[in-house]
Image: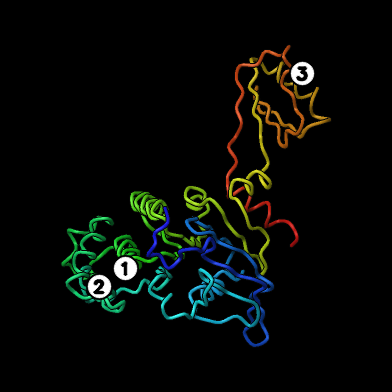
Amino acid sequence: MEDKNSFFVGEDVAIHLNNVDKSYQDFQALKNVSFEVKKGQIFGFLGSNGSGKTSTIKLILGLITPSSGEVKLCGKSPLNKELKSKVGSLLEFNGLIANLTGMENLTFWGGLYDINKKEAIPKSWELLKLFKLSEWADVKVSNYSYGMQKRLGLARSLIQNPELIVLDEPTLGVDPETRQLIRKIIKKLANEGKTIFFSSHELDEVQKVCSHLAIVKNGEIIYKGSLNKFIGDYSKSELCINLNTIEEAKKLLSSIEKKFNAKRNGTLIRIEDIGDFNLEDYSDYNISNIYSNKSTLEESYFNINTEEV
């Protein structure tokens, strides 16, 4: 149900880039970039170093302006002053002050968003509990581990209760428990109607939380749309057939290798790009078990990046 107090009320699109170019002197970082992020989505944004990811993030946050084209957040310019308090972000710089405690950091940032201390303290306690840092509330951040600073940095990005949250590598370098906690919180935020822009090199993390994505390569968008469709379109499905004997496996391989890309390892036959392979046509073989390897975002991402743009 839509929140009537939401700055996004009446808007289905949280982030809109249309024909965006960005140049730095003689270098063109972005070329005709267009994509949309719908309200309430967890949207993955992928690209290698130097692909244009950072420039795109800075454009969304209003830290830079496009050379040409249009960037809109819920129908408004990222430079809109009222919009600033509706957008949270966690970038490479986590925004924390090392000689302040966890609580002091959060209340300090609350003050920057005009949240008075009386209101900021309970908000901060709530966030510290959410990120399992309440026992460290009165400890200086200089004594926090890297993973704890990552959690506090994400908590800091939520102090003003933003409706759009831009995250750059939120799980990079943290332990598995922290990864799981951050994933859980990101999903919780999305269930509350918030929009998450999730930029990361960690493809497994993106696959676990995102429903849609865009991929940038050499400053151009080479894919935008459903994550599941992307995996289906760019992964190579593999069927594994285990036979009872090596002789049976050799016989099956001989009968299919001219039509299918198949390999044998002992009694196991692997078939890539199964296409119109129909197992019923080979029912006379003594098959012990069959399984298919699950496609991954990493596999699909590698495949699309080996193609020419």
Q: Amino acid at mark 3?
A: Asp
Pointer 1 local density, CA inside 10 Å: few below 14, some 14–19, many at least 20? many
Q: Amino acid at mark 1?
A: Arg
Tell me which corner region of the image, top left, top right, bottom left or bottom right, holds residue 131: bottom left
Residue 305 relative to residue 65: left or right: right
Q: Position of residue 33 (x, y in %)?
A: 65, 70
Label pair 2/1, CB-CB below 8 angstroms: yes
Could you say which disc has been placed on residue 281 in the image? 3
Is label 1 in a helix, a strand or a loop?
helix
The residue positioned 40% from the left and 69% from the top of the image is: 88
Residue located beneath label 2 in the image:
105
Could you say which disc has been placed on residue 253 in the image? none
Residue 19 relative to residue 181: left or right: right
Front position among marks 3 and 2: 2
Front position among marks 1 and 3: 1
The residues tagged by marks 2 and 1 sit, at their Cα atoms, a distance apart of 8 Å
Is label 3 in a helix, a strand or a loop?
helix
Q: Position of residue 61 (x, y in %)?
A: 48, 74
Q: Quadrant of the C terminus?
A: bottom right
The residue positioned 72% from the left and 14% from the top of the image is: 283
The vertical placement of 120 against 213, above or below, is: below
Label pair 1/3, CB-CB below 8 angstroms: no
Could you say which disc has been placed on residue 156 in the image? 1
The residues tagged by marks 3 and 2 sit, at their Cα atoms, a distance apart of 66 Å
Q: Amino acid at mark 2?
A: Asn
The residues tagged by marks 1 and 3 sit, at their Cα atoms, a distance apart of 60 Å
User: Which numbered disc, 2 or 1, marks the residue that appears first in the sequence?
Assistant: 2
Q: Position of residue 221 (x, y in %)?
A: 66, 64
Question: Looking at this view, is 296 or 62 the one in front?
Answer: 62
Residue 185 relative to residue 38: left or right: left
The vertical placement of 31 against 154, above or below, is: below
